Amino acid sequence: MSELDNFDVVIGLEIHAELKTKTKVFCSCKNEFGALPNTNTCPVCTGMPGALPVLNRHAVCLAIKAGLCFGCEISPYSVFERKNYFYPDLSKAYQISQLVYPLCIGGGVTLDNGKKVRLNRIHLEEDAGKLTHISHAGGTLVDYNRGGTPLIEMVTEPDISSAEEAVEFLRRVREALVFEDIANCKMEEGGMRCDVNLSLRPKGTTTFGTRTEMKNLNSFKSVERAINFEARRQAEVISNGGVIVQETRKWDDDRGESFAMRSKEQAQDYRYFPDPDLLPIEVTKEDVSNIKDEMVELPADRRTRYVEEFGLPQYDANILTSTKYISTYFEKCVEFYNAPKKISNWIMVDLLKLVKEQEEIVFPLSEQHLAQIVKMVEEKVINKTVGLQLLDEVIKTHKSPEVLAKEMNLLVTISDEQIIELLNKLKNENAKVAADYKVAPDKVTGFIMGYVMKNTGGKANSAKVRELISKVF
Ligand code: ADP
Ligand code: MG
Ligand code: ZN
């Protein structure tokens, strides 16, 4: 038993995701990852005196889409404010963000266990530059390319109670943002980052305890580890009669522990005030409905539909909706040949195996071609083994399965005479099989069938073989 067993864990997350725009949020510099340092910069995003920001409409649309993904209310009126602080990655000495009037309000995500994690808000803001500390040179490099790129910040209510719930929530968020082309959420590139706020309270009580915050976690694994470490640390402090101080802690992934950075007393006063250079954002109902029209069906909704409409197991539905590409591919196949579970099996077993090394999955044959192969197998024109051969050949040649099947002589059917001949041969050579068949036909039919299939390259019609076995034996 550990000290933690006496406590409930209370977690609220703040998630930053970089929006998938071509240009930055207040200037026309490119929004791209990996460019040469300080090449995507201008007087606006570096904050030169007198430079004026111009709002990127696409960034606002994407932030609204994010709100619509999670059932937020889209505010008809929201305001940019300056968050003032000095730090070398922020050459303007203030970040343009939203505080009192955010763009999206409320909403939430329902987890598999039925719990709803409520969102407090989603707001639009700009990112800061990137510092690289060079320890052997005793210095720090700064790259302002990222400065001024658009971010959404999503803030949850403190509704999460475990590392597992936190990770499930993050997966859901990432999945929806990627599906809707709102953000790439490449965590290894910093495209999605997460702050964890965590406190404990004695089991069964309702008053919140004092929380700590761990900033900028950039993988699901580190979120999970940071939460488990911090929950245990707090439980130990409290159980030993200590108190938790409200502070920002830094998670060190290599050491697997967090340490204090700054306490609330040292917390900065950001002196937020409305940015005088930017007008409030006004969004009409019509704007919202136009943006809604551009969106595709959300992964969670697709999953439900696959189970209800196509009768697929939940497991299949989860895999098929893991990316928009796979989901769209699957649905197109079903349009060509309405056998959802069969198609699902081919995709999950035979196709995903072929592309498992690819970073971004693209199947090597068209939906129509896959559907044709599945259909030929289901209609017993060919068997599954031949179907797989055909699959390989279609991938190599890009010819249609029907054409190829003819060219490769796969459609040649084995005549009844040929089958009878084979059966007689087996009967003569293998007296035991013949004897066994007399006693328990069911036990050896499979063996005899296998013999015929092996000697016909799998091309014999299995119903026919079954019929002839009973005649010959
Ligand atoms: P701040 O403005 O200091 O960042 P907020 O009230 O906006 O504080 O809360 C930030 C995050 O902390 C939210 O996700 C919220 O749910 C979470 N949070 C607030 N109080 C607690 C608490 N006692 N325990 C855990 N998380 C909390
Ligand atoms: Mg915070
Ligand atoms: Zn710029």
Image (cartoon, rainbow, N blue to C red):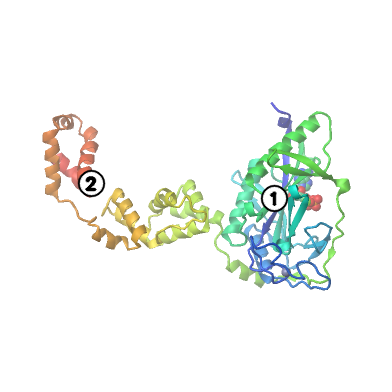
Residue type at tag 1: Cys
Q: Residue at x 22, y 34 (%)?
A: 444
Compared across the picture, whether 461 is left or right of 85 comes to left
Residue closer to the observer: 294 or 19? 19
Residue closer to the observer: 146 or 468? 146
Q: Which callout, 2 or 1, points at the residue further toward the start of the chain?
A: 1
Q: Mark 1 — residue?
A: 194
Quadrant housing residue 453: top left
Where is 68 relative to 459, above or below?
below
Q: Residue at x 15, y 45 (%)?
A: 419
Residue closer to the observer: 110 or 199? 199
Image position, residue 226 (x, y; %): 70, 41
Please give the label number shown on residue 462.
Answer: 2
Q: Quadrant of the C terminus?
A: top left
Residue type at tag 2: Ser
The local secondary structure at tag 1 comes to: strand
Image position, residue 277 (x, y; %): 81, 72
